[in-house]
Amino acid sequence: PKPTYLSDYRPPAHRVTHAELSFDLDPAATRVKARLHVERHPEREAAEPLVLDGEQLTLEAIAIDGQPLGEDEYAVDEHGLTVHRVPERFQLDTEVTIAPQENTALEGLYQSNGMYCTQCEAEGFRRITFYPDRPDVMATFSTTVIGDVEREPVLLANGNPVERGTLPGGRHFVTWEDPFPKPCYLFALVAGDLEKVEDRFTTASGREVTLQIWVEEENLDKTDHAMASLKRAMRWDEETYGREYDLDLFMIVAVNDFNMGAMENKGLNIFNSAAVLTHPHTATDAAFQRVEGIVAHEYFHNWSGNRVTCRDWFQLSLKEGFTVFRDQCFSADTNSAPVKRIQDVAFFRTAQFAEDAGPTAHPVRPDHYIEISNFYTLTIYEKGAEIVRMLRNLVGWEAFRSGSDRYFERFDGQAVTIEDFVDCMAEASGQDLSQFLRWYSQAGTPEIDAHGEYDYAECEYRLTLRQRTPATPDQPEKLPLHIPIRMGLVGTKSGEDLTLTLEGEQLGRDTVIHLREEEQTFVFSDVAEAPVPSLARGFSAPVKLRFPYGREDLAFLLANDSDGFNRWDAGQRLALLALDDLIAAHRNGVEKVMDPRVVEAFRSLLAQADTTDDKAVLAEMLTLPSEAYIAEQQPLVDVDAIHAARTFVKQSLALALRDDFLAVYEANRSDAPYAPEPEQIGARSLKNVALAYLVAIEDDAGIEHAQQQFAADHNMTDVRHALTLLTHSSRDDLSDPALRAFGEKWAHDPLVMDQWFSIQVTRPQSDALERVRFLMDHPAFSLKNPNRVRALVGAFAGQNRVNFHRPDGQGYQLLADVVIELNRLNPEIAARLITPLTRWQRFDEGRQELMKRELERIRAEELSPNVYEVVEKALA
Ligand code: DPP
Ligand code: ZN
């Protein structure tokens, strides 16, 4: 397979202005008729042939302006269709057949639990019909779906239904029209035996919109939260960005077999059932919040993505980065804002930093790819969102909003680039953002080394920042970036933010300084007392910032920093320093000793449990950095030492503060009916964090509470947490009966069984790998369903570090076996699953060899472009 390059971009030679499609559904041979209204691009030559994408299609008929084409007038190969000579403007009619029932890749038109559905982003439409499958071809669509009255009573597509009727032979049809021009990646069709929940929304300008969520009948009781989230998101986008919904109907459909989380098809969003269905008894608080965020994300795409879309797939972050930023802000506004930020950053620093440091590192706007579906990454999405967040902070909310208005007005109905977006922000703010644009083209995580000196005599504080971005594949040299650092200086006597004066300018107590050079020194004057700097508040830039904090400094910031995010971060840094010592002790076979400063810090945190107004933040502060994040900090990852050190810290804290944890647990229990609301969620997380410490030392009261919490069956958050604690303890007498009861109770619900799979295969005990193999034969498991694969194999390889990295290499072998099988069934999921193996550089030589051996074993297979691209990069 050959790469596609950004620098090769050319506007399409032909564009489609209108597409009339008709689908006569059949599992083995669905007949797709397409009438495309085509025009030659005014600047392209008359002699250019018409080239359309098409894969796995059987062409049955072809005509131009009603005249069937002779065999020498066109050619079909495995990538598409070429018509050698075409007029300047014409109608192309084609008829093809496709086989949805054989489509295990879940791209294009496929079947899931008997229903028909589509996934076209990025390049799935070419598996439906011959078409210029690229986002800069925008057409209006009219779609007729013909199905069986009994099997497919519901026939959906984009836009508004305009006609329906019955046909001979027990068939019926519905015709849909979408008046908004769109690229074909936003096309959607759904047909099956579905039920709906309906609601209404009145837009700011008074238009009535019908909202529908379509599900299988047994899931009708799991849609309330998604519907409420949708309405909140619609209102929020009006109030925050001035964006109204534009059709009369907005539909969401839940599908069981789905590669992504969800898809923003115009007027007909298709969701992975895991990203839309919730019920207090089947979904955790985290799942409720995830559903809210994804519903909002897909809805927000209606403007940032659909009305204004991407010129080419290199611009993917144009819609994804902006939309993730929008959904993050929405979730922050509806829940605890500091907790949302803490959770997003904790995840980002673990997973995106690892991506940036590995062989698949790429810029937020890549300049080449082999398979675009490999680029739906944390870099494009989350780092893209961090860049948009920096922009918002650089220009200020007002200019940002006015830049956003400009962007939507100027480019409505167009397919545009990242520069177009940034230009709007530059115009609205009058700022020069040219250096800032490097964030989009330069891969890798910038590292900042900071140090500061307080001059008592001059009352000056000098802060020196030095930036460097390490080399990444294809990019050995890096240029300095424009990095906004939000900061304060916290007085060591007062514990308060000091007033900042920089080069004679008064900047308040919390300010942003701009690092643009490789090295810069900022001199703050009139600093009345020695300060501890609080840097990159709120994670003001996606960088690694090192500062030689002492442990007292960190304990001080943890207690005094006015920025909640940095208070949390100070605690994480303090814990990391202690963990470093313990990891070294473990490796050297020396007795481990707990740092009393960490114990004292936790004691003061626990003392705030009664009075804090944000229990969710406190729960985050009481949570140790994850094994994955600790590993990110180590030059050479020693999974066993990390696990042992972290377990030791957890147990030491639990032993020292046992009564405090118990009191916090007991004070935060509640019998109130479940609601996914911030206050309840905060209390539940705090209580459950406390319980985890107690069970970590097998405290009798703790174990009893865990068992009771499991048995009480009040809500899935509590049940799942208790089951996880019992299953991850070393006591099989606790875990076995609970797992059995849970598995029997929920055997009928695949989304709950996914949780049951994940809990078991992430246990640290040495039988985890055997459990994976055993559970792969469980009747509820199927390699064909992406959710099952992620819950079982993905969770094991991605989250069970000690067992995946077993020194005998069996974890790697298991993953490679699954990848090889999935490569044939579902290349997109196969390619994603490989990720943990691609990180081999970070491990000891023995493991490196074993990991590479498995990558080579995969490479020896006949590979899909998806898997090929990842494996080649990993072994390069
Ligand atoms: N489903 C993906 C998303 O919404 C692709 N657009 O981000
Ligand atoms: Zn998206």
Image (tube, grey):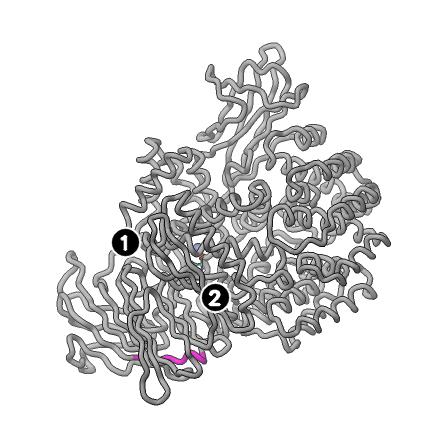
Splitting the image into 4 quarters, where does residue 109 fall?
A: bottom left
Q: Secondary structure at mark 1?
A: loop
Residue 383: x and y, percent? 48, 46
Residue 568: x and y, percent? 64, 38
Q: Nearer the viewer, mark 2 or mark 1?
A: 2
Q: Secondary structure at mark 2?
A: strand
Q: What amino acid is found at the position of numbered circle 2 in the picture?
A: Val
Q: Which residues are magenta?
A: 96-102
Instruction: Give the farthest residue toward the right.
Output: 700
Q: What residue appears at the point 56 percent right and 39 percent down from the top-left corner?
A: 544
For ligand 1, the image quadrant comes to bottom left
Instruction: Name the residue carrying label 2.
Output: 197
Residue 176: x and y, percent? 31, 69
Image quarter where the N terminus lies is: bottom left
Vertical position of residue 51 compared to residue 462: above or below: below
Q: What amino acid is found at the position of numbered circle 1 in the picture?
A: Gly
Q: Nearer the viewer, residue 143 or 647?
A: 143
Vertical position of residue 148 compared to residue 489: above or below: below
Instruction: Name the residue carrying label 1.
Output: 413
Q: What residue appears at the point 54 percent right and 29 percent down from the top-left corner?
A: 487
Tell whether position 713 is magenta: no
Can I make out residue 474 in this image? no
Q: Earlier in the sequence, mark 2 or mark 1?
A: 2
